[in-house]
Image (spheres, rainbow, N blue to C red):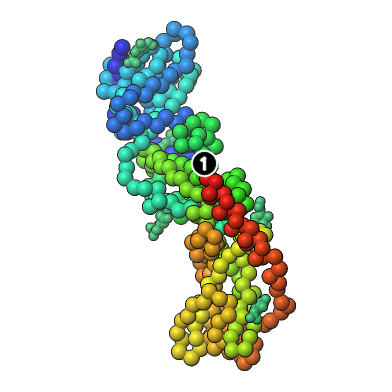
Amino acid sequence: MKTFSLWISGLLLISLTGAHGLDYFPENLVVAKENDVNPIKLTCGTTTKETVTWKHKGEELDEDSVEEGVELNGSDLILSKVETPLVGEYSCWRGEKMLSSFHVLLEKEEAGELESFMSCRAKSYNCSFSCTWNRTGYAAVRLGLGHDCRQGLKSCQWLGSSSKKIQNGAFQFELPHSLSPYAEESSRLELTAEAISINNQSVLRRNKNFYLRDIIQPDSPKIVRCQAVDQELNVTIEPPSTWSAPHSFFTLENEIEYRLKDDDKRGRSSSTLIPKGISQLRVRCRDPLVVSAWSQWTPWKNVRTGREVPCQSRKKGGKKNRKKKQEKRKNQDAGLSQAS
Ligand SMILES: *[C@@H]1O[C@H](CO)[C@@H](O)[C@H](O)[C@H]1NC(C)=O
Ligand SMILES: *[C@@H]1O[C@H](CO)[C@@H](O)[C@H](O)[C@H]1NC(C)=O
Ligand SMILES: *[C@@H]1O[C@H](CO)[C@@H](O)[C@H](O)[C@H]1NC(C)=O
Ligand SMILES: *[C@@H]1O[C@H](CO)[C@@H](O)[C@H](O)[C@H]1NC(C)=O
Ligand SMILES: *[C@@H]1O[C@H](CO)[C@@H](O)[C@H](O)[C@H]1NC(C)=O
């Protein structure tokens, strides 16, 4: 077994070529764990006994250049105890022909839970949800759902290696899922996030398991009309257009906040009947069955300072079968959660 080293001049050369990080995930990514005792084997992939040469960041690794942690074994390269100087691109050559290449990055034992820099939210039980990555210092971020991604298998379908970058270090993802909106979830979604640091050297990897119902947060509802009923105001509220249908099945609970005309005091109501003498109101909603997060409030809506009918009134709505189906949904939930 021979030992080889890496020329530091190679590092200098590379750093002159650009200060941009790796803003995509290379196909041939090899992730080495910090302080891992198991060596990493890079296979050249040649079957012949011909001699091959290895390059690290474009610099040939020859017998004179000896550095700790890099060893040649046949045509394979063995990296043990990978530290920062050993990261980067490795390629195996026979003459002018490149036989294989690898991009070695280091997975650092960094602190910080995924929750502290990534939040996910579903606007409905429909087929996707969104996540926002919020941590600076990363040039590329990707997310994957399922066991294969957690294990880092090739079969994982990563999303967003060239994802939308929204602002300073933030990335936005829209993740499709195949959960039925009607069934109680029996198992959690497994989300894996990977990110490459802007200095091209390290990879951050995190997992998070959760139920879709835990990240439900509807969009704001709509205030359709207000109608004077005796000394009160009957506010008609509709679910946001992004909410799952049918609405008789996917019920939402609303909360109204209002400002009283007389003293500008605020009040809240979970009933749609509120005091008549108000100047403004706004509404938010949530799924009462899973007790989801509240939506954002709607903007304040001015209530006309007229007399009898503060808001335009139109035709009456109907409650119809809502009660029945709600019961059905509740029963279904109860039944399934007992079964799980
Ligand atoms: C990161 O890697 C890419 C691709 O190998 C390279 O183009 C870029 O210059 C590297 N950036 C740094 C800061 O090393
Ligand atoms: C080198 O390869 C040989 C045979 O393939 C193997 O027995 C040996 O353990 C290897 N050495 C290292 C350090 O992996
Ligand atoms: C995103 O970043 C902002 C500002 O740094 C912070 O206030 C917010 O809590 C972050 N959100 C998440 C989900 O990490
Ligand atoms: C998603 O929700 C919208 C709004 O309720 C609905 O119109 C649409 O059919 C839903 N799509 C699926 C695939 O469930
Ligand atoms: C409030 O309005 C809704 C329709 O918008 C109607 O169904 C309901 O009966 C009204 N409530 C009262 C107390 O008038």
> Quadrant location of residue 320?
bottom right
Three-letter amino acid code of the residue under disc 1? Leu
Residue 333, position as x, y percentages in the image: 57, 54
Q: How many marks on residues? A: 1
Who's the residue at 55% across and 70% down the image?
A: 254
Q: Is residue 268 above or below residue 248?
A: below
Q: Which residue is mark 1?
A: 145
Res 13 visible: no
Residue 165 appears left or right of 3? right
Residue 78 position, x and y percent, is 35, 20
Q: In the picture provided, is 312 more to the left or to the right than 280? A: right
Give percent across and percent down for residue 188.
50, 45
On whether ligand 4 comes within 8 Å of the CB at mark 1, the answer is no
Seen from the viewer's position, the closer of residues 129 and 171 is 129
- At 44% from the left edge and 31% from the top edge, which residue is drawn? 29
Label 1: which secondary element: strand
- Find the residue positioned furthest to the top: 49
Of 106 and 216, which appears nearest the observer?
A: 216
Q: Quadrant of residue 322?
A: bottom right
